Amino acid sequence: MNVMKAIKLIFLICIANNTFAEKINLDRIIAIVGDGIIMESQLLEAKKTYLRNFEAANTDQPLPPETFLEEQILENLIIQELQLQRAFRAGVRISDQELNESMSLLASNNNLTLVDFKKEIESQGDSYEKLREDVKKEMIIARVQRGIVGPKVFISEQELNNFINSVEGQNLLVIEYKFDQILLKDKNLAEEVLDLLNQGQNFDILKNKNDQSRNVEETLTWKRISNIPTLFTEIVKEMQLGEYRGPIESGAGFHILYLKDKRGDTVRIEDQVLARHILIQTSEVRSDSQAKKLIEEIKEKLSNGEAFEILARLYSDDPGSKLDGGELGWSSTDKYAPAFKKALDEATINEVTPPFKSAFGWHIAEVLDRRKEDISSNIQKNKAYRILFERKFQEQLETTLQEMRSESFVEIKKKS
């Protein structure tokens, strides 16, 4: 190498070193967190986002002191980094499809298409790709939190019932009831009237004829459980729509209750069917055409008088129902595969359907009965459980993150 080339090379190295040094000065390490680091640029970006959100919130609260604010933001970044490292070690991944669905939902929540949402973000001077990355991090962290905190949350049946019956629970799980009653002084007469009701006789006619209360013409109103006499509360909560209960004894006599209606966001009346079926699946030794031929032969056997339950036990490939003669129990058809739902919805009671194909194979089915079932109690319990779970989850999450922080190596670099 000649002298001029050597001088030129040294000159280029010096320029590179100076440029690198400038970058180091502009963006320095401010914290070492476990196996990772946090750069000053991350803190400044997070602070910028916080200030923008604070301004957008238009709150009357004063802005926290700058030193305190930076300390809190840095702590949040440390906790975030620790969770991301935990996710990496556990192999937590978010697929492109999951991320795309989340971005589409975010756009939809802003009443925009994904394309317009992207344009809107970029028109504000922000990076859509950075937003995608931030959303991905949030999804990863949420998955980690569910994994490490979820198993620690326990809600007993007693705790659930106590919440449902509490004043707070009643306010959050509002159900209103409209019920009527017949009051009789004689217990034997009350039992006779109840038998007539269960046989299908009209409630209003029997009430007008037999009721011995002072308020025969009382207008029925919607009532919360807290406004219903204590004697009836537990009974009314358990009643199905259109059900009669009694005789219930009180100081006034014997009551027969009739639940006429109920309403609320946890009230659900579900159309259900009681059905049975026989399934013939394809396999390595049975082609689709062979499966279809076999189900047609079974249908012919049924037409010739052979018992459905016996044929189901002999031929059905559904292990969950064949031992019960193909019976599936009471259920909403919404829980079945589309082709199976369509067949049951169109079926006539006690008539076997023609053979039809679903994603599982070839079927014949029979609807034995239909009913409307009040599943409000289950819906109410599920909502109460979600409320309690979310509270306990947040409490446990805070404790878990504090423990994670205290058990991890974190070194905060002071400004020189």
Image (spheres, helix red, strand yellow):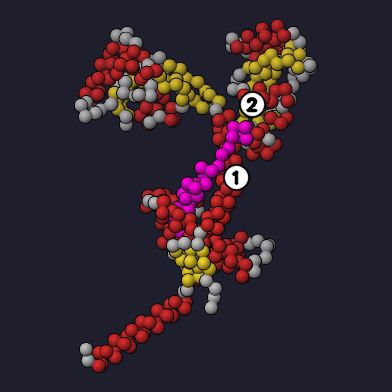
Give, as a single range, the part of the protein colored magenta.
134-160
Of the pair 91 and 365, the residue shown nearer to us: 91
Q: Does residue 330 appear to the left or right of 307 in the view shown?
A: right
**Residue found 73% across the figure and 15% down from its top:** 249
Which residue occupies 71% across, 31% down? 226
| Residue 311 image-quadrant placement | top left
Up the image or down, 279 lies above or below 137; here it is above
The residue at which mark 2 appears reads as 237
Marks 1/2: CA distance? 25 Å
Residue in the foreground of this view, choosing between 77 and 130: 77
Does 340 appear above or below 93?
above
In the rendered image, the quadrant that contains the N terminus is bottom left
Judged by its main secondary structure, the magenta piece is: helix
Q: Which residue is mark 1?
A: 391
Q: Position of residue 59 (x, y in %)?
A: 65, 61
Characterize the local packing of mark 2: few (<14), some (14-19) or many (20 or more) Cα atoms within 10 angstroms: some
Asked which quadrant contains residue 68, the reply is: bottom right
- For label 1, the SS is helix
Residue 310 lies in the magenta-colored region: no
The disc labelled 1 sits on which kind of residue?
A: Arg
Counting residues from the N terminus, which is met first, the one under dot 1 or under dot 2? 2
Q: In the depicted view, which residue is nearer to us: 66 or 3?
A: 3
Q: Residues within 10 Å of mark 1 (few under 14, many from 20)?
A: few
Q: Where's residue 121, x and y in %?
A: 46, 62
Q: Is residue 135 magenta?
A: yes
Image coords of residue 41 (percent x, y): 48, 70
Q: Quadrant of residue 221?
A: top right
Type of the residue with mark 2:
Lys
